[in-house]
Amino acid sequence: MTRAPLVGCQRPLLFRISKPVEFSSIAAVAHMKSPETQLENTPETLQNYPVPLSPPPPLISKNLELSRALTASSKSALFSLSREDVLFEDEWLIAVNKPQGIYCESVLSSVRNLLNADQGEQVKLQELHLSNRLDRDTSGVTVITKKFCQEVIIDLVKKTYLAFCIGTAPQWENITIRSGHGRSRHGAWRVYAFSDAGQTLPGGSFVRDMETLFEVLSVNGKGCLKASSGSERHGEKLIVVEEKSEITCDTDKAEVLVRAHPRSGRTHQIRLHCQYLGIPIRGDVKYEGVCEWKDTIYEGHELHAESLSFEHPVTGQSVLIQAPLPLWASQALAQLSS
């Protein structure tokens, strides 16, 4: 397997078949109840670990997330792709548009069924691999490798996301935020200080660095004067996280449409950074986003994987894959042109 060099802050996508993750086991439960683990979680021991700088999930999120998970499981069991959902395909790769509220594993199974129907041959599930994994309620570009491309690294990956946020109106047009990222002792993903990167967390994991560039597209339906392209950063502000956020969501909340350019690929990265910046994503109850807004209840967060570009690992050609916009995103962008 060859590895192309990293350029800038981009992280490569490694395409590899892996065994399914076991979410729970008797051994894991036994470990959590062991004297050694209990000792690790004592207040005296926890003083030696980095302190998360973002709040834990609100209590209200527990039941809502469980309800959403059950609904998504039912929808995912019945989910199937059509040819209209395919955004890109060649001998080695296939990209599809994942809808909100569907698990990636169901997308993978549906791709297998789609390929089998088209090719008249049996493609095994083990021959397909998710190269980018989207959260359950995140929609957009999902790339899957075929059996001929199992051990290929795609470098120079660039991604853009759209997010509809409710919070304090930003005082910036473009901002880059750098922070630490890791699981707290309660199992939730949290923001940590950037200087904590590399330090050990309870359970043996480590704080890792993460970085995202945000550009504000609109506030309360009014477009900003200038939106950057990711490489053209006009008036960009830089935040290196070392303390808890001082931004509070006041009562006069604004509707904020942002485009995010993640420069790392951490779990819930954009959602965590939006929370830290005081503009949690609408519907994202786990990270303090509103679930009800203007008499409408939202069943999932409004985050869309808009585009993904990279150099093709086999042909060397530049590939740009764009997903159709969900209704909330097309309506928000339509306001800017009206």
Image: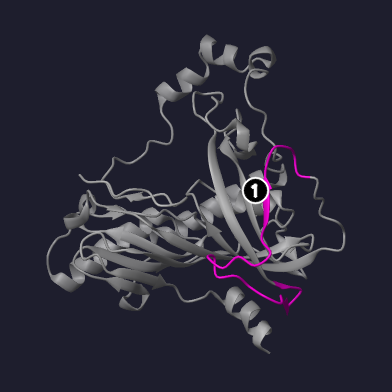
* SS type, badge 1: helix
Q: Is residue 31 above or below residue 157?
A: above
Tell me: residue 97, above or below residue 29.
below
Q: Is residue 61 visible?
A: yes
Question: In front: 62, or 142?
Answer: 142
For residue 328, side relative to residue 3 (left or right): right
Q: Nearer the viewer, residue 68 or 9?
A: 9
Q: Residue 117: within the magenta?
A: no
Let me know if residue 241 is in the magenta part: yes
Question: In the rendered image, which quarter contains the C terminus?
Answer: bottom right
Name the residue at 59% across, 11% down: 39
- Residue at position x 73%, y 77% from top? 221
Q: Which residue is mark 1?
A: 286
What's the magenta region? 218-245
Disc 1 packing (10 Å; few <14; some 14–19; many ≥20): many
In the rendered image, the vertical position of residue 293 relative to residue 54, given as above or below = below
Tell me, yes or no, if residue 299 can be seen here: no
Of 2 and 112, which appears nearest the observer?
2
Q: Position of residue 317 (x, y in %)?
A: 27, 69
Q: Residue 234: percent from the left, percent from the top?
A: 65, 67
Q: Residue 321's image quarter? A: bottom left
For the N terminus, which image quadrant? Answer: top left
Q: x and y percent of residue 306 in the render? A: 49, 69
Determine the residue positioned at 49% across, 49% down: 264
Q: Amino acid at mark 1?
A: Lys
- Residue lying at the far right in this picture: please name it: 251
Magenta-highlighted stretch: main secondary structure? loop
